[in-house]
Structure formats: C-alpha cells, structure tokens
Image (cartoon, rainbow, N blue to C red):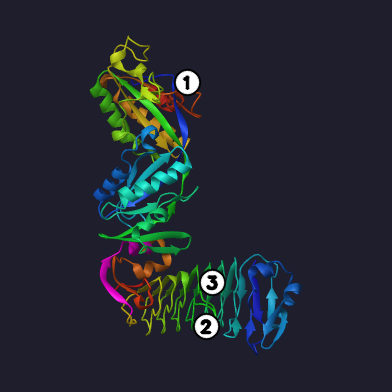
Amino acid sequence: MIINGVEIRDSFAEAFPMVGTRLIITADTPEWAMIAARTTTGFATSVIGCGCEAGVEREIPAGQTPDGRPGVSILIFAMDFGSLKKVVPLRLGQCILTCPTTACYAGMEEGKRVPLARTIRYFADGHQISKKIGSKRFWRLPVMEGEFVCDDDTGSVEGVGGGNFLILARTREAALRAAEVAVKAMGTVEGNILPFPGGVVRSGSKVGSKYKGLFASTNHAYCPTLYGTVESALTPEVGSVMEIVIDGVSFDSVAESTRVGIKAVCELGAESGIVAIDAGNYGGNLGPFHFKLREIMAEDAKLAEVRP
Amino acid sequence: MTITLKPVAPFTARVDLSGITPALLSALSRRDAEYVQVPHGGRRVGLGDLFFIENAGGDGPLVIEIGDDRLDGVGAGLGAGEIIVDGPVGAFAGMGMSGGVIRIAGNAGDYLGAEMSGGRIELARDAGARAGAAGSGSRRGMSGGVIRIHGSAGPRLAERQRGGLVVVAGDAGEGLATDMIAGTAAVEGSVGPLAGRGMKRGTLLVRNAPELPAGFVDTGRHDLIALRLMARRVKDLAHLLKDATAARRIVGDTLMGGQGEVLVLG
C-alpha cells in the first residue's frame, strides 16, 4: 500500500490492556491549568520505568469545566487497577494540590472508583470540609493560597496501551517534522494520549536485552547507524526513525488516532522525505490488541487513489 | 397510570398517611387498597372510608387531589416513585424518606422531610417548624436528599441536619441549623435570630450576615472555588450562587468545638 508516495508496510502495532482514568484540572488561567497538567503527567512516558503512562488529552475552554474556569483533561494509565489507585493520588498530591489556583475533578463517571481527595484530604489535618450533594462528594482543603477543591474520586476504564506507528524518513529533520505534524493532528482525537516527550519517541525499544535483568533495549532493527551490521528493518535511504506511542480509552479511539496520525504524515508525502510507515510488535503473541496498518488506512488509501 | 386519592369529605380528625406510597398502592387492587388501615384521630379506618381511590394497581405517581393540613405523614417512608399533593399537607410529610419525589402545591406542617436520607421534596409554599430536622427525641436530622422550599421555613429549620441539602427561597425562622452536624442549608431571604448555635460542621449559605451566637468567628471574605463548582453542579443552588465567586466565611460554633461555617454571599 502506498499513499502519496509513502509506503504503508504490511505490519501491525501490538498493544496491551491498561486501566486508565481521566482527571480534569482547572485553574485561574489556562497557563496554570496546563502547568499542573504537564507536571502531573511528567515522568510518565512508559510503565516500564515510571509506573504509569500519562499525558494531556485536551484543553477545555472556560465554561465547559465543572467550576467554569479554564481546564485541561489528562489521562493516566497503569497496568492494573491496584497500580492506578496508587499512582493517581500520589501525582494529585504532589503536582495538582501544590500548583497555584488549581482544582481537580473526576473526568469519568463509569467504572471502578479511583480515589482522589479521599486519599489526600488528610493533608488538611482535620480542617478538610466534605460536601456531598446528590451522589457526588467533593472536598475543600484549606491551603496557604486559599482552598483546594477536589472530587472525592473518579471513574476508570479498561483501555489500550502501546498503540504505535513508526515514521521512517530520509533525514532526522524530515522524521521529526512528520512526527510533529502527526502529533498535532492526533491531538484532535479525544480519548487518547501520546505519553512520550512531545508525543514522540526517538528510542523505540524491543523486549529483552543481551544484558541480564534489562527488560527492554534499543530496537536495533530500526537503528539507521546499525544498518548492514544487524538484521535491519530499514532500507538504505532511511536515515532516521521516529515512533509515536498511543494510549487510549478504547481500541477504536487508538485506531482512530493511529489513522489520523498516519494520514497527516502521508499528506506531507514522499517529497518531504518520508519513506514508509511501520509499526512495533512482538510477533503478535504478547498483546491481545493488533492495529493492522493497512486495514486502518484502507479507506484513506482508496481516497488517495481517486484524488487527482 | 396515575393513582388518585380524592377525599370523600373534609377530614374530621388528623389522618396519618405514613407508608401510603405509590409502591404500596400499585401492588393492591382497589378493593384491597380501600381496606388499608390508616390512623384517623384516635382510631384506625380503611383508606376507602376517607378517599375515593382511582387506578389502584397503576404504576404512575400517587396524586392526592385535595390537600389538607390535617393530612400528616404524606410520603413518610417513601423509597421510590412520586407523590403529588394538590394543596397543603400536615406534619411529618416525607419524614424518613429514602428516595423518590414529593411535590406539594401548598404549605406543609412541622417536620417536613425530618430524618430523610434520600429523595427530593418540592414544597411550593411555606414549611412549618423543624423541616429537615431530627424527629422528636432523635439525635440526627436529615442525612441526604434535597428539600426545596419555595416559600419560607419556620423555626429550627435543619436542626441537627447531618447531610443533604435544604434550599429556602424565602425566609427562615429562629434557630436555623441549631446543632447542625453536617450538610448544607441555603436561605435566600432573611434568617431569624439564634442561627447556628451548636453547629458542629456543615454549611449555611445566606445572602446577608445573620445574627449569630458568640461562638462564631469571622475569618473574612475569601474567593472560594467551591461556590463556582456548586453553582454549576447543584441546580438547586444555581439561583442563589449565580456568579458568586467570594463569600465571608464565619466559622462556628467554636464555643462548642464546632467547625461549621456560615458563608455570607452578599
């Protein structure tokens, strides 16, 4: 399959079940809401080393948030519910509670409950105030700046982690530019995050290593400087590969995000230095979710053909 | 289909309708419903002796066509469904209810929604004493649900309230939220004397600072995000809290070790 001169390889991304939740962070200004969101989702690129994967889902305009102030929604994913229940209150307490003017609300109603203020209310040392009206409880914690308002808990969802695609380009500059364009386009699809720095991974990994005790190591088959010395997945003209990893609330949302991202890269076309799109997998035996690139891009490929 | 109770004649004594719920009447035939015994003055009579019953066995709301201030215990113990009263009710309406809705087109007597734990009461006019409070001899008042009073409330509104929400569009009488344990009471009009004495926790939302006991401490005026949240999340408070971002926070009753608060919006 070739779209606008870019080869879509007959490959698939292999993804895993993850448990995730959504938080809505509001603040007096969009800037402070984003600072809290970025801090909370910092050091959360991969569960391998961070315990969770997290990222900014989208900005929410003032008027559409629970308290009417500008907000940001973030998603946090962990490998199981027990881990999620640990990491969410930790990040809430260290990164949102501490951030000026913020408040934090549940971004999901369904699923098992993940504690928010139910855990961190004790910071208020007995001065915490609970309000339960209807079925929803929130807490007010007196802090030096004023009051921190936070929902008691939030819902959770069984999502998908590790959806991905690889951009194979002639130069580092071309690969990065394509990745940036893809990340921007994928930001419009709700229910997903791209947990790596700026949404892009330059050091995709394979499972295992020659060194004992190392779970993951560099994906040598896609390292251009090793081309010819190892069994490579690259062709001679590929000078750089960037990966985009996607975690989402459902298979469909990750598939749609993948499609939008690849489409954006293909629109740049071969003339901007893009050679091919590939995906990372482990042979199909480890993860239950398979995102087959050619199936996902079938409709777009047809449209690209009829376009003059 | 709507189940209807229409008084046969003006009541000659007080009637206790506690436990007469849509669920009860929907499970009975008209004949059986007529034999349900209700206290009437000093004795018990069949429901059919007091009311014409239409559509018993129906699954709709229960409508009491002509209300009367001698009808006590309307909707007391209600767990689900809807009761509509076209007129006033007596005391103990919605007492101990845990769910469902009661709509009353007239006034209500004392102990409206006392000790309720869930559901909703909509009162079109005035409530008597101790709405949302603890019943006589009880230690705890309403613990959940919403009482919406579109008129004014009598003395001791929300006494010993420990949860839920009471909203009064008019005024509240003396002793508002006496010994309040938790929960929220909002009064849009004026508040009578002796409000908040013995408050442990809980919130009083008012427009103007009421006369408070000596144990209340003014912490000053603060920008409170919680007001913006409640204005959006709690429809019953939207009118009172509209555009409110700050309030004077008066904490008490500190002489009783309480941490309740009176939030003065104006």
Q: Is residue A307 visible?
A: no
In this picture, which residue range is highlighted in magenta? Answer: B215-230
User: What amino acid is found at the position of numbered circle 3 in the picture?
Assistant: Met
Residue receiving disc 1: A283
In this rendering, which labeled residue sits more in front, label 1 or label 2? 1
Residue receiving disc 2: B110
User: What amino acid is found at the position of numbered circle 2 in the picture?
Assistant: Asp
Q: How far apart are marks 1 and 3 (CA)?
A: 60 Å
Q: Which residue is drawn at 45% across and 69% down?
A: B165
* Crowding at mark 1 (Cα within 10 Å: few <14, some 14-19, many 20+): few
User: What amino acid is found at the position of numbered circle 1 in the picture?
Assistant: Gly
Q: Residue at x 51, y 29 (%)?
A: A288
Q: Where is residue A116 in the image (x, y as percent from the top left)?
A: 40, 52
Numbered circle sitting on residue A271: none
Q: How many marks?
A: 3
Tell me if B16 is positioned left or right of B169 in this view: right
Residue receiving disc 3: B116
Q: Does the magenta stretch include residue A191?
A: no
Chain holding disc 1: A
Q: Are marks 3 and 2 in contact (CB under 8 Å)?
A: no
Tell me if A143 is positioned left or right of A193 in this view: left
Residue B253 lies, with reference to residue B193, above or below; the image says above
Q: Position of residue B233 (x, y in %)?
A: 40, 61
Q: Which of marks 3 and 2 is nearer the N terminus?
A: 2
Q: Distance between the residues labelled 3 and 2?
A: 14 Å
Direction front: furthest residue: A212
